[in-house]
Image: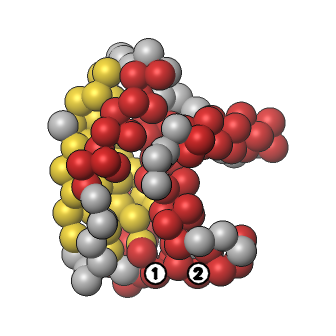
Amino acid sequence: MIAFNYETEFKLVDEKSTENWIANCVEKEDFELGEINYIFCDDAYLHKLNVEFLKHDTLTDIISFDYTMGKLISGDIYISVERVKENAKDFEVSFTDELHRVIIHGILHYMGFKDKSEEQKTIMRSKENDCLLTLIN
């Protein structure tokens, strides 16, 4: 089950399509969808979580709390809509494309994909791109 929660004025245009897309990406990697909570918020909200829980005094686009057990994917994914907008400008992509990349990025972490080293980042980006290709806009 996927739940979308909003702590800001932003709202997904089509929650059901997004949910189906995420579920397909999870299944494609041979994982099972458990409970995923997306919380869309602003920079201040996410910054507070970053300081409080991760001891990082920086802005970020996503923080995920992973409750995955084995192949059952579960967790809370907080996304700063403000950061996604800024990153979209910086990367010269649409807001929607960047948002989808961030949405699936958290899920990929739950499946064990990392992004600390350059090699890990390359694999993560490839997995993101694979999922993005299955998205029907």
Indicate whether 113 appears above or below 31: below
Q: Residue at x 66, y 70 (%)?
A: 93
Q: Quadrant of residue 91?
A: bottom right
Q: Is residue 71 left or right of residue 4?
A: right
Q: Nearer the viewer, residue 125 or 59?
A: 125
Q: Quarter of the image containing the N terminus?
A: top left
The residue under label 2 is 86
The residue under label 1 is 82
In the rendered image, is residue 67 in sight?
Answer: no
Question: Of helix, strand and loop, which one carries label 2?
Answer: helix
Other residues around mark 2 within 10 Å, as few (<14) / some (14–19) / many (≥20):
some
Assess whether mark 1 and mark 2 are in contact (beta carbons under 8 angstroms). yes
Task: Estimate the x, y position of residue 58 in percent, counting from the top left.
Answer: 55, 75
Q: Nearer the viewer, residue 24 or 127?
A: 24
Indicate whether 111 appears above or below 137: above
Q: Residue at x 46, y 47 (%)?
A: 136
In the rendered image, is residue 23 in sight?
Answer: yes
Q: Residue at x 62, y 36 (%)?
A: 130
